[in-house]
Amino acid sequence: MKKTVLLLSISLLPFISCTNESNIATNVTPQATKPEAVAKFNGAIKKVAMIKDPAPAMPKTSAELSDEKKDMLIPAAKELIASTGVTLAEIERQTNNDREKILKWAVQVYGDYNKKVNQNFKSEN
């Protein structure tokens, strides 16, 4: 009987070990589980941030983006807003295709997403 219990415990050890490893592997950081629209907008922001602008004729504040950079962000911004359930027609209607309004809306959605993820991550830990 002792041999059977010992043999059974030894044979179950790899299963228990693998179960623990899979639990650890699935406990990923919030950055690794981003929805596609959020990841694209984040990537677009990083891409725009890497572009060096030539020296402007008139000094700009650091918050201003060039028209080219805004144009690069708009597709990802629209996709991010649309991922919340808003149609493209509704985005165009509410913003009148104003790039500033679209980008502000997308940044708000992006911020809300990050805030929610951080709250969930803190509550899990």
Image (cartoon, helix red, strand yellow):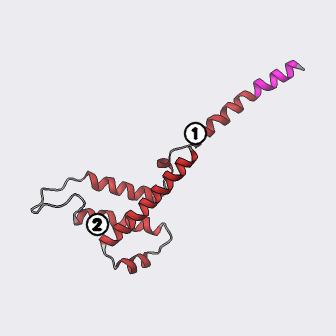
Q: Tell me the quarter of the image containing the C terminus.
A: top right
User: Quick one: label 2 or label 1, which is nearer the N terminus?
Assistant: 1
Q: Hey, what amino acid is under mark 2?
A: Asp
Disc number placed over residue 36 in the picture, else none: none
Q: Residue at x 57, y 43 (%)?
A: 27
Label 2 packing within 10 angstroms: few (<14), some (14-19), many (20+): few
Q: Position of residue 87 (x, y in %)?
A: 47, 75
Q: Quadrant of residue 93?
A: bottom left
Q: Position of residue 122 (x, y in %)?
A: 52, 47
Q: Residue at x 46, y 56 (%)?
A: 115
Q: Which residue is mark 1?
A: 25
Majority secondary structure of the magenta segment? helix
| Closest to the observer, 11 or 121 | 121
The reply to whether discs 2 and 1 touch (Cβ–Cβ < 8 Å) is no
Q: Position of residue 52 (x, y in %)?
A: 20, 53
From which residue to which does the magenta span run?
Answer: 2-11
Q: Residue at x 11, y 63 (%)?
A: 58
